[in-house]
Image (spheres, rainbow, N blue to C red):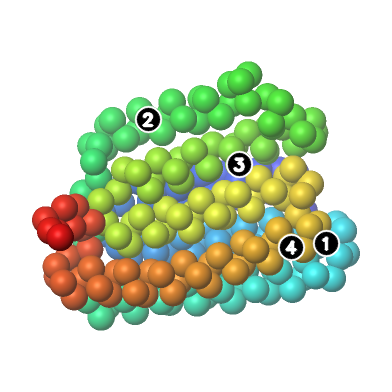
Amino acid sequence: MSISFLQFLLGVIFLTVVFLHLTKKNLLATIAYGIQSFAIMLILLNSFLETKIFYLLIIVLLVLIIKVILAPLFFVNFIKKHSLSFSVSTYFNTPLTLIIIAILTFIAYSQKFTPLTNIIPANQPLLSIALSFIFLSLFLIINCKGALSQILGILSLENSIVAFIVFAGLEQSPSLQIGVIFNIFIWIIIATTFMSMLYKHFESQDVTSMKNLKD
């Protein structure tokens, strides 16, 4: 794949992260995560085509099955089961959220992070935007009140880390990639338990409802 196509994939990922901040519909957020994961899969596929390392092909297939297919299907079924059409509000309103997104993106491109994004000089622009994904995903976890949105933020953070790993030339570590895939399994289990219990007790996915819990 050409560098321009990889930049296009990173642009898609960036837009999905921003969209996750702005959308109020759980279904659309789940679709955005699926698109983001598909873009990550294509980036990993490109890495396999360049290196011809067989285990990377296995990772690509696992990402396709777990991140692109199984995880979105799980969230869609959860949304349908509990009739969750809209997600709860964020702590910051939309204009302020966009301002913070712009600031975090600017910080990722600042000279303070040049030693980190210059690991491979030829990939510095790609590493900078991948770093911005990490910042925006962390902000998504903090800013959202909905349990589903927070979990999507965590999974988005993992996608962001994978993108950074690939363009930093670290994707050839099998233990690193297998660890990421293992985390997906763990988070799906946590998501099943946490969101089901939250909705069962509060009939809402708003995590702020838990502030009323007493010993």
Q: Separation of disc 1 and disc 3 at Cα?
A: 21 Å
Closer to the chain start, of discs 1 and 2, is: 1
Residue that badge 3 annotates: 130
What is the CA distance from the residue labelled 4 to the residue labelled 2? 34 Å
Quick check: 149 above or below 56?
above
Task: Judge from the rendering whether residue 53 lies leftward or rightward of residue 196; answer left or right.
Answer: right
Q: Secondary structure at mark 1?
A: helix
Residue where numbered disc 4 is placed = 175
Within the image, what quadrant is residue 188 found in? bottom left
- Mark 4 against mark 3, which lies toward the viewer? 4
Residue that mark 1 sits on: 49
Tag 2 secondary structure = helix
Measure the alpha-carbon separation of dots 4 and 3.
Answer: 21 Å
Mark positioned earlier in the residue sequence (4 or 1):
1
Q: Decide which of 93, 194 is in the foreground and name it.
A: 194
Q: Mark 4 touching mark 2, by CB under 8 A?
A: no
Q: Amino acid at mark 2?
A: Ile
How far apart, in angstroms, are the residues tagged by discs 4 and 1?
Answer: 20 Å
Is residue 87 in view? yes
Instruction: Give neighbour class at mark 1: few <14, some 14-19, many 20+ (Cα, 10 Å).
Output: some
Q: Secondary structure at mark 3?
A: helix
Q: Residue at x 67, y 37 (%)?
A: 127
